[in-house]
Amino acid sequence: AQSVTQLDSQVPVFEEAPVELRCNYSSSVSVYLFWYVQYPNQGLQLLLKYLSGSTLVKGINGFEAEFNKSQTSFHLRKPSVHISDTAEYFCAVSDQLPGGSEKLVFGKGTKLTVNP
Amino acid sequence: DVKVTQSSRYLVKRTGEKVFLECVQDMDHENMFWYRQDPGLGLRLIYFSYDVKMKEKGDIPEGYSVSREKKERFSLILESASTNQTSMYLCASSQGVGGSKLFFGSGTQLSVL
């Protein structure tokens, strides 16, 4: 079974600073990777995903992530954050199940706080 | 836009009560999921379903059951609520396999007293 580790539970940064949220997953032959964002009092929404192809994936709101197979990592980055990026970010990996179905396994989340 | 609707935003129940959490999606998705979200623990999968009347246990199914009589509706049932089931419950749906996007509801914050 797949597992996901988000190395930082909280990341405080100043507005307009760059940020990196770290994510490592357990190794597998093939893997689909995701970042979801949860704004306060809302459900989760997809930020970006990696299925195949280019290892650099661009998402919404200026975020991007890089798939690194040798390091089993999928770190999320943004060159300049805004106050509105304050949210909790979840890394997830797709776990293929016998019978053909699949489920998403989530990390424990990283709370990003952007300060003025 | 896909809409996943959870019937209650906040719910307060007493220990031992039978609790129903309802979730409806409007995009004819095959797959539906129930997660619980707890601070510091992230999202943990309780049950999921990839077809009507089909259900699969997730990682923490104990104390829960589910029902999927219609494709658009997926219900989570707490047979006898306990205080350790106080949590945020999130429903999600998706179509197909191969890295499909999950669409989430806004969540139900359940408090069991």
Image (cartoon, grey):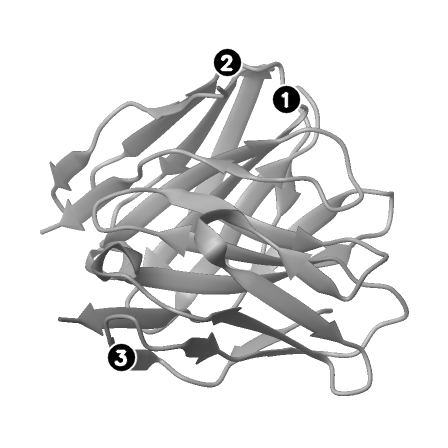
- Residue A98 in percent (x, y) is at 86, 51
Q: Is residue B5 above or below residue A39?
A: above
Quadrant position of residue B110: top left
Q: Nearer the viewer, mark 1 or mark 3?
A: 3
Q: Residue at x 48, y 39 (%)?
A: B65
Determine whether the residue tagged by mark 2 lies in a helix, strand or loop: loop
Residue beneath disc 1: B29
Q: Chain of mark 3?
A: A
CA separation, marks 2 and 1? 8 Å
Disc 3 marks a residue whose amino acid type is Val
Closer-to-camera residue (B20/A115): A115
Q: Is residue A114 above or below residue B14?
A: below
Residue beneath disc 2: B26
| Horizontal arrangement in the rendering, residue B26 relative to residue B20 (left or right) | right
Q: Which mark is residue A13?
A: 3
Quadrant position of residue A13: bottom left
Determine whether the residue tagged by mark 1 lies in a helix, strand or loop: loop
Disc 1 marks a residue whose amino acid type is His
Marks 3 and 2 on same chain: no
| Horizontal arrangement in the rendering, residue B68 relative to residue A15 (left or right) | right
Q: Is residue B111 above or below residue A34?
A: above
Q: Specify few, some or many for label 3: CA neighbours under 10 Å numbering under 14, 14-19, or 20 or more.
A: some
CA separation, marks 1 and 3? 38 Å
